[in-house]
Amino acid sequence: MTYFGHFGGIDHTCALGELEARIAMLVEQLGTLGCGGKTLETPREEAELQRKEEENQHLRLELQMVETERVRLSLLEEKLVDVLQLLQRLRDLKISKRALGKLLLNTLDACRDPAHAGRPGPSAILDALHQALAGCELLRRQPSDPATAAPALPNPLLISC
């Protein structure tokens, strides 16, 4: 702190010395009191603090698990929406119910196959169905004549005359 002593006279040097002494005393007090500045007076308070810390840690872990599950469900929802849109596009192309059923059954059979035992469950079936639908030849080719395609009605229950 003597670095600042050249700015003024003796008064500044004395003030800096007092300031250094005061800072040293405060640092010592902080060291004895701990970083929190509060000492625990009873073992009961210490046990309560420990319990609250454990509860806080438990809640953090639970929040992390909920967030992970939310992300997983969000991804699953996106995949499901994609599959439903692909199915709707196939239906709009007037693919027969028999062909759609065959595509679905082939996907289910492929997922049941022991060679495909990577990830069992609905998520794996949805992934396989998405791949099968995305790879469908009918979706890749565009209708050759737009006039032959039936016009899309805003409400499928309405019949135009």
Image: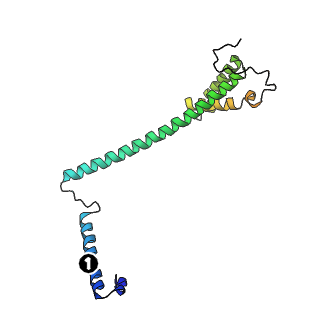
Camera sees residue 121 = no
Is 143 in front, or is 48? 143
Q: Position of residue 58 (x, y in %)?
A: 36, 44
Secondary structure found at label 1: helix
Residue displayed at 62% across by 25% down: 108
Farthest residue to the right: give it: 144
Instruction: Find disc 1 in the rendering and name its residue.
Output: 21
Left or right for 74, reference 37:
right
Q: In which quarter of the image is residue 4?
A: bottom left
Q: In this view, does 60 lie above or below 1?
A: above
Q: What residue type is labelled 1?
A: Ala
Q: Is residue 95 above or below residue 38?
A: above
Q: Which residue is rendered at x = 18% and y = 56% of the image?
A: 41
Decide if residue 67 is in sight here.
yes
Local packing at callout 1 (Cα closer than 10 Å; few below 14, some 14-19, many 20+) is: few
Q: Return the residue found at the far front.
A: 161
Report the coloring of the rendering: rainbow
Left or right of 85? Residue 10 is: left
Q: Pinpoint residue 138: horizontal percent, then vertical percent.
A: 75, 27
Question: On the image, which quarter does residue 113 sit in?
Answer: top right
Q: In this view, does 106 lie above or below 17?
A: above
From the top left corner, tell me how far across and down residue 102 is, in percent.
68, 20
Out of 113 and 157, give the one closest to the viewer: 157
Position of the C terminus, as image quadrant, is top right
Number of disc labels: 1
Residue 135: x percent and y percent?
71, 32
| In-image side of 24 versus 124 (left or right) | left
- Quadrant of residue 86 in the image? top right
Q: Which residue is drawn at 36% across and 47% down?
A: 57
